[in-house]
Image: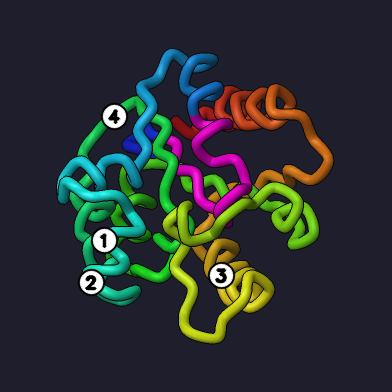
Amino acid sequence: MSDKKKNLVLIGMPGAGKSTVGVVVAKMLGYRFLDSDLVIQERFGKLLHELIEEHGIEGFWKLENEVNASLDTEYAVIATGGSVCYEQEAMEHLGKIGTVVYLKLSYESLVERLGDLNARGVTLRTGQDLRGLYEERTPLYERYAGVTVDCEGKQLRDIAAEICDLVRQEKTV
């Protein structure tokens, strides 16, 4: 992996723990923490679900792509929104500025963790359920991942430690 990669980019389904794990990993490595969903909300002055209602799902994805493709930071842990995997431009940019880490979790565990999908800003197409979303996104996460961390049955601190160990062993960032 390239020496230019000075960030960690966390991808995965909503509820996989990207933001929660990201904060802990950033503290452990002494990095900044950046939540791209919050950057989107700040840039457009609206909550995610408001942007989805206003622009539609595909319009929201364009906004998400624009923001993620323009991130310019170093030594940061970047937690992305779950739908970033649909935007090739953003994913290619994120892969250039950091090591992409897929936080993998089973469908059953996601069901247990997730509350109201709309309030979380999850983009579901008409007639699509969480199972369909999971099956659609999983191959995309796997395609873009530089590293996959299986989060099944693990505590937050153990997932964070595993990611930090990977960084230290591989000197990826």
Residue 32, numbered circle: none
Tell me which numbered mark, 3 or 2, is placed earlier along the sequence. Answer: 2
Callout in the foreground (2, 4) = 2
What residue did someone put label 4 on?
A: 74
**Which residue is denoted by mark 2 in the rendering?**
55
SS of the residue under disc 3: helix
Q: Dot 3 corresponds to which residue?
A: 137
The disc labelled 1 sits on which kind of residue? Answer: Leu
Dot 1 alpha-carbon crowd within 10 angstroms: few under 14, some 14 to 19, many 20 or more: many
* Residue highlighted by disc 1: 51
Measuring from the top left, give residue 127's x and y in whole percent: 55, 86
Dot placed on the residue nearer the N-terminal end, 1 or 3: 1
* Closer to the camera in the image, 60 or 24: 60
Instruction: Say if the magenta span includes residue 80.
Output: no
Residue 16 colored in magenta in the image: yes
The kind of residue on which mark 2 rests is His
